[in-house]
Image (cartoon, rainbow, N blue to C red):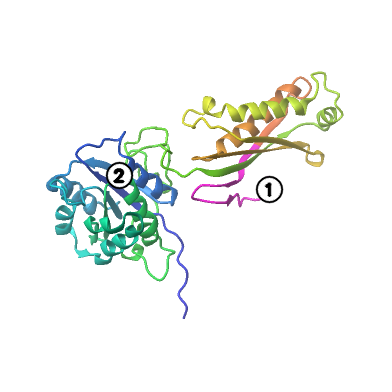
Amino acid sequence: MAKQNMPFKPLNVAVLTISDTRDETSDTSGQYLVEALTEAGHHLADKQIVKDDIYQIRAITSKWIASDNIQVIISTGGTGFTGRDSTPEAMLPLFDKTVEGFGELFRQVSYTDIGTSTIQSRAVAGMANKVVIFCLPGSTGACKTGWQDIIRSQIDASVKPCNFVAQLKTVGEAVEACQTRGVIMSDNKQFSHVNAQGEANMVDVSQKAVTTRTAIAEAYIKMSAQTIQMIVEGGHAKGDVFAVARIAGIQAAKKCADLIPLCHPLMLSKVQVDFEVQADQHRIRIETLCKLAGQTGVEMEALTAASVAALTLFDMCKAVDPEMEIGGVRVLQKEGGKTGHWQNQQGNN
């Protein structure tokens, strides 16, 4: 009997940066791992920075191993040969089983980038209390190699013929409370703008690749048949209603970061606002497209453009039709970044 394909299952992952010098502002490796695992669909359960000290490393790791909530631990740093590099010495006694192949495979894939210098990498991995632990070097490049070439696929239940997911502890599909002060919510979803301490923060996108990103959004405004006729025939006293609403939508997309506190200011390359009169449903459909070459998506810009265009239609026509109704604001599709193409599957509004 053929084996069934297993669906992707989000896991709870903790990230440990081991360094005597780094803090949250300079921890590019730890931040990369956080962004990579969340973009892949996993949940950040905790993130800490610890001195390169055997006993401090063991204390934090042991706590995570014993936790009911953590399934994967990824550490970065302390795997070299300098006097303070002690991650393998700290971690190996904690393992129930050592994943011998991890270090071998990591050095193999690293050889392409750093040649024979890879021999000095003491990357290790193991299992403890049904938690898989990966110990990576401290450079951001090494973390990218370890994540993209090994870890990402090995903590993905859909990868065949084998991965680590079936070996890990089971965490309930629903978490009763916000167990890490806002990071993992009751429906197992994650807020990307909430850090491990539950504080609002702007996501650092500096490590993301620059790709072409687009987003298409829509909104609707319902109005009377007479109002629609007035707009279409150009009989409105304020002039060309669609032209004003189109300019308003474009301007709103450019000002999105001023309106939504944690949005990044973006250099948009294209903003398009189109209108479709749906007279049989007594409404006007607004569709917006935003595009750029950048490190973060443009969904919020497209949504803001659609919303403000709808509001502008309302403002232009409220004197003759105060009962107009705005709704159906949503993202239809987006393209770019690690997630590639995404399309809304909810059907037509």
User: Magenta stretch containing residue 20, yes or no?
Assistant: no
| Residue 259 found in image quarter | top right
**SS under mark 1:** loop
Residue carrying label 2: 46
Q: Measured from the top left, where is residue 45 in percent x and y? A: 32, 46
| Residue 230 found in image quarter | top right
Q: Measured from the top left, where is residue 167 in percent x and y? A: 31, 65
Q: Residues within 10 Å of mark 2 (few under 14, many from 20)?
A: many
**Quadrant of the frame with the C terminus:** top right
| First of labels 1, 2 by sequence position | 2
Tell me where the magenta segment starts and ends, as one range. Answer: 328-349
Q: Residue drawn at (41%, 63%), measured in percent from left and top? A: 157
Q: Measured from the top left, where is residue 25 in percent x and y? A: 31, 33
Q: Residue drawn at (24%, 55%), measured in percent from left and top? A: 121
Query: Label 1, label 2: how many angstroms apart (C-alpha)?
Result: 39 Å
Q: Measured from the top left, where is residue 111 in percent x and y? A: 32, 59
**SS under mark 2:** strand
Quick check: can you spot residue 116?
A: yes
Question: Residue 348, labelled with which disc?
Answer: 1
Q: Residue drawn at (53%, 32%), measured in percent from left and top? A: 266
The answer to whether residue 331 is above or below residue 122 is above
Q: Is residue 75 left or right of residue 44?
A: left
Q: Amino acid at mark 1?
A: Asn
Q: Amino acid at mark 2?
A: Asp
Q: Residue drawn at (21%, 65%), measured in percent from left and top? A: 97
The answer to whether residue 189 is above or below residue 288 is below
